[in-house]
Image (tube, coloured by chain):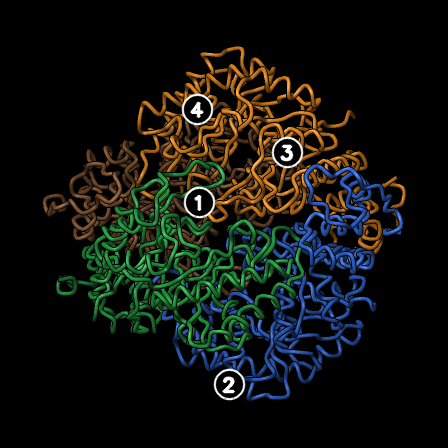
Chain colours: A brown, B orange, C blue, D green
Amino acid sequence: MSALTFGAGIWAFGQIVDRYATDGYGPSRTMSEMLDLAASVDGLECLDINVPFADGVSKTSELAAALAERGLRARAITPHLYTREFVKGAFTNPDPAVRERAVERVHEAVAVARELGAGYVKFWPGQDGFDMPGQADYARLWDLTVSAIRELASAHPDVQFAIEYKAKEPRVRITLSDAARTLLAIEEAGQPNVGIVMDFGHSLLAGETPAEAVQLVHRRGRLVSVELNDNWRGWDDDLPVASVHLFETIEYLLAVRRIGWSAPVLLDQFPFREDPVRALSQSIATIRMLEQVCDRVDLDELRDAQERQDALRAQALLWSALGAARETAGAAGEATGTARETAGAAGEATGTGTARET
Amino acid sequence: MSALTFGAGIWAFGQIVDRYATDGYGPSRTMSEMLDLAASVDGLECLDINVPFADGVSKTSELAAALAERGLRARAITPHLYTREFVKGAFTNPDPAVRERAVERVHEAVAVARELGAGYVKFWPGQDGFDMPGQADYARLWDLTVSAIRELASAHPDVQFAIEYKAKEPRVRITLSDAARTLLAIEEAGQPNVGIVMDFGHSLLAGETPAEAVQLVHRRGRLVSVELNDNWRGWDDDLPVASVHLFETIEYLLAVRRIGWSAPVLLDQFPFREDPVRALSQSIATIRMLEQVCDRVDLDELRDAQERQDALRAQALLWSALGAARETAGAAGEATGTARETAGAAGEATGTGTARET
Amino acid sequence: MSALTFGAGIWAFGQIVDRYATDGYGPSRTMSEMLDLAASVDGLECLDINVPFADGVSKTSELAAALAERGLRARAITPHLYTREFVKGAFTNPDPAVRERAVERVHEAVAVARELGAGYVKFWPGQDGFDMPGQADYARLWDLTVSAIRELASAHPDVQFAIEYKAKEPRVRITLSDAARTLLAIEEAGQPNVGIVMDFGHSLLAGETPAEAVQLVHRRGRLVSVELNDNWRGWDDDLPVASVHLFETIEYLLAVRRIGWSAPVLLDQFPFREDPVRALSQSIATIRMLEQVCDRVDLDELRDAQERQDALRAQALLWSALGAARETAGAAGEATGTARETAGAAGEATGTGTARET
Amino acid sequence: MSALTFGAGIWAFGQIVDRYATDGYGPSRTMSEMLDLAASVDGLECLDINVPFADGVSKTSELAAALAERGLRARAITPHLYTREFVKGAFTNPDPAVRERAVERVHEAVAVARELGAGYVKFWPGQDGFDMPGQADYARLWDLTVSAIRELASAHPDVQFAIEYKAKEPRVRITLSDAARTLLAIEEAGQPNVGIVMDFGHSLLAGETPAEAVQLVHRRGRLVSVELNDNWRGWDDDLPVASVHLFETIEYLLAVRRIGWSAPVLLDQFPFREDPVRALSQSIATIRMLEQVCDRVDLDELRDAQERQDALRAQALLWSALGAARETAGAAGEATGTARETAGAAGEATGTGTARET
């Protein structure tokens, strides 16, 4: 099994602000400083980079050089479609002139992506939606969304586009909120070169099971990028990988492996109160460790337990692979791997279970 | 605008139990008693009826007579696919024999539906899903779901089927959880005679905006039934219509009207602690009143406000139609209907707003 | 019944930023411009003002003059305890020097409050909490919180302090998250001059029933301020009053009236995409209209319905008062006000109900 | 460190029903069969037993003998206060006669508790609350709740009572919803012999951090019982321990240890689709394994990391103790235990960290 490789959203290394700490959660940094930090994260190979660029770089060629110098490359280009002029929407803005500027900004991003050899241009329509009941003509928002996707994708048939869905923030409610709705919009747009960025945290926020959603997107042939991070399910906290949801992350990595994912896994983190280099390094180390856990999962036994819907057994296999559940396995009779649903029969298990983990 | 007509799930009139009040929230009732209650609800014309039948009726012909006698008819037939033998799933049960029994039960429901002239057979796969992380092979659950839909729909090409999606309960997490995922499953099944039951409360539970979801389903040509009730968004409380979400219900009714819905609207309520006849009568009265509210909404002005994303204006129009916002309109300057985004300009409105509501 | 008076957080008139639209949701404004806008909101009499002041004012006396000039006054002073230096907490910051600066900033706010004659100094410890499981010594966070409250309140026994609780944002999870926990902290601090700011939206976010929480806080003698706004329950959206939760807002106003509230009601809104003057004007107009609705509620009948737990009747009374439910009342038999729990008896009501609303 | 001991709610071994699978999730069982199953769970020593008893036992003395025979004992007695006659509330029922019957049932439970030597009588007022906005007089519900607690506790000053709070289910919203509110009610009741049952899952459902809540309850001297299970935060799923929330469970066990808990830990599970003996055995095995994890946590280092709010370091210590994070520790530089907030410095760590886990 070849190891995963890693990228990150460059914003993790910039200054983060919010509506309260308007003076920023850390120092302001130039593009050059941000790239220095990115380069110092062990295992980080590529970046998702916003257009327009952060301060300190004006031409794409400069950025290309700065990346190359540090052994980094552009994995994705994300046009800023959610800044002040787009707060009432980019693709769905009520003002046609603003919609036009959004389209132009995507064209600009495409040019950058071509020059940097990025794998895809990302749409993150975070201001496209509404705020209050009664406010929106949903059918119109949908039409405008689909039309914009179609127009842009058909204008650049050789470029891969990918939509990162999200249920909310910054818009109170966002139109492309989850994987299935975004698949429907993409399929309605009818262009082959548009897919999905499956962000683990956005999937949790949407109420999805991330490991399920990533397979659903893959099944429709629309999986373009895989992103990891974590949150508490109620907001896009953009925390380090598996800082909250361990089993869901293992499951997700197993699903990513199952579909044969070989492109980089991107980290979309906002280390508000942490050093970004440490925060991202720890996430990569966590994923590498969890890949070893995945290596130790007995997939045949897991499939068997899943097929029988033996939830206790399936979980015991994950605990065992984690190296933490040996005693559980024996004590709970999980070692035999047989369904024992007759009442009272919990004690017969004797397996030492030692063979499985090492 | 022709008025809506109404139906209800027959379970509203039966004895409800849960895991705590196992002795029931009210008296046990025979089918005949349940039908008597249903017939006494003003405006209630049709029912969604479970197969197997409740106690007291054994043959479909008997039921047909009992319905006719009371001026009721069957709108839908819902096979019990979530009782004890199906607690690990109906269409996705690990045991092929159980899956086969689920299919047989649907065949049985089809026969009843034909005999009673019901509009559709409903699938509500509430036990098809999983409980814990790691337990499920999601791709397999999806495959089994799609296959079952395809098999059943193709076996009865003249029968309309409809899936009622739900995010959870009784299964901790249900595979067909929301509108978009269910549309994807239906489209993958590839049969024309399968659609969706859009239950307002299930839509809230799924984190959707019901008025948006119903238009999305309609857009794909898959809207088979519309159901109303209410809840607190975190659980399928099955409360009376608009008891919690007034504006969302108005929006939903406007959407239902916009797509030209002419079939009955069904009430899916569980009146745990209320008299079922009063609870359903009040819901119908509420909808009728809200239809008058919808009549009073100035749709041109609403469309205009929505197109400009003037949320304050759009909401003011709904308040006005509700008959409750006249003073608001004037005081907040809503009467002019023009966008006034220049800072400080709130005071110019003078309209008494009296013309709009009558 | 004397009418409510109104205030607002001054931040509604300033430039809002978030982590995406870092260039702001509207223009930057000086204190003077913000005050001009505030003064143009019909019915707005007082403000909650942050210390340090916004740009354009350096001395308290200047601000006092600017307020007086515009017929405004300071209702509350809120020290910025959540800006960059406090992102790991103000009262619970790991660094004692930062904790000391937080205390000093409160002293500074007290001086401003005295000079402006503000009713209270507000603590909003939005960065005091944690981000990930395992990170925090909760007992220590609690100790530090209680100690800081005690120290500050006892240092200024003649000043009223009030804590605005919130479950999350900006900290991923905040220590003083809801009304009851905050009451416990206040009571443990043991000072009489500390109370609570009951923000309707924060109450929803905490999973509370706002009308219940405000009575609980009042019962313990700790209610210092009442704030209104609205949200979707999952985040502090700071939307206009009753834009989402109409019945809950009516209930809240009834509760506020019941406890004899006579101080101003404050609006805590963030009009990201709306003109602030319109957004706040509309909220005030909404509350005024809902006060009339409250006037029309037959409180004796409501109390009777509540005492009998006749939920349908209680809701019907609110609908009637809203002026929107006359037909409901008749159709559902609510007009008689008697419990009719015998099955089938829904039709007897005849009351036209017309007397109540006009 | 002495090991934890274990008990369980006896309902885990009975037949579970819900509003859909009204024919039950498994076979019906007599009290004797339930006790047989309980006795077969390795490590299970005591039970929380409902009054009235399940079928098959009529006298307390019989039950005492049946328990003794199997080496079990009663840890708690829980009167059924949520069955049909109490669906509109037990202590807050609108009908004084029903409130009286609730009180009598508690007296009955006290008698059983005395005879069986149970540690406490549990109140679980799951039907005491409301369903819809506008329905309830919250102050009255609170008064009735506090009065009932006071009356019952003062009637039996030698008996320990404990309230198990819960936010919802079966009532749509329950009055005693979380730890802090329940503490306030208890303190208002003013009796020393009333405390709290801290159920991990109910704490998650209430939006609390369980490890924080248990310390808060202990701090007020009101912790009577500790229960473990798990859920998805949105409902009381009553799943096996740590099946969803691993780190939160570790944290909780560390908190339980920190406060010196020596009484049994109770398992409150509803194994809808699992063999109850396996499900509970696995939970006990999980806790035992996690106790070893707790043994391996370097508490001095954890305290140090927490005091510095070094979230990454604190989590790394938990991962290490879990035996799963060795590589992480090294790779992310966590082994040194020093704060390294200077940008870019992530690589210096070298510690093998091997000493800690074994």
Closer to viewer: mark 2 or mark 1? 2
Q: Which residue is mark 1?
A: A202
- Residue that appears at 25% across and 55% down: D284
Give the side of residue B357 with respect to residue A141, left or right.
right
Distance Cα–Cα, label 3 vs label 2: 57 Å
Please state which of residues D114 and A240 is positioned toward the viewer in this rendering: D114
Q: Is residue A27 visible?
A: no
Left or right of residue C248: residue D181: left
Is residue A286 in view?
yes
Q: Could you tell me how far apart the alpha carbons at marks 1 and 4 are, in whole angstroms? A: 23 Å
Q: Are marks 4 and 2 in contact (CB under 8 Å)?
A: no
Labels 2 and 1 in the same subunit: no
- Amino acid found under the numbered disc labelled 1: His
Q: Chain of mark 2?
A: C
Structural distance between the alpha carbons of marks 3 and 4: 41 Å
Q: Are marks 1 and 4 on the same chain?
A: yes
User: What residue did someone put label 3 on?
Assistant: B267
Q: What mark, if any, has residue C151 been given in the picture?
A: 2
Q: How busy is the neighbourhood of tag 2: few (under 14 within 10 Å), some, or many (20 plus)? A: few
> In the rendered structure, which amino acid carries the disc numbered 4?
Pro
| The quarter of the displayed image where residue B1 is located | top right
Callout 3: residue from which chain?
A: B
Q: Which callout, 1 or 4, points to the residue nearer the camera?
A: 1
Q: Position of residue B348 (x, y in %)?
A: 85, 53
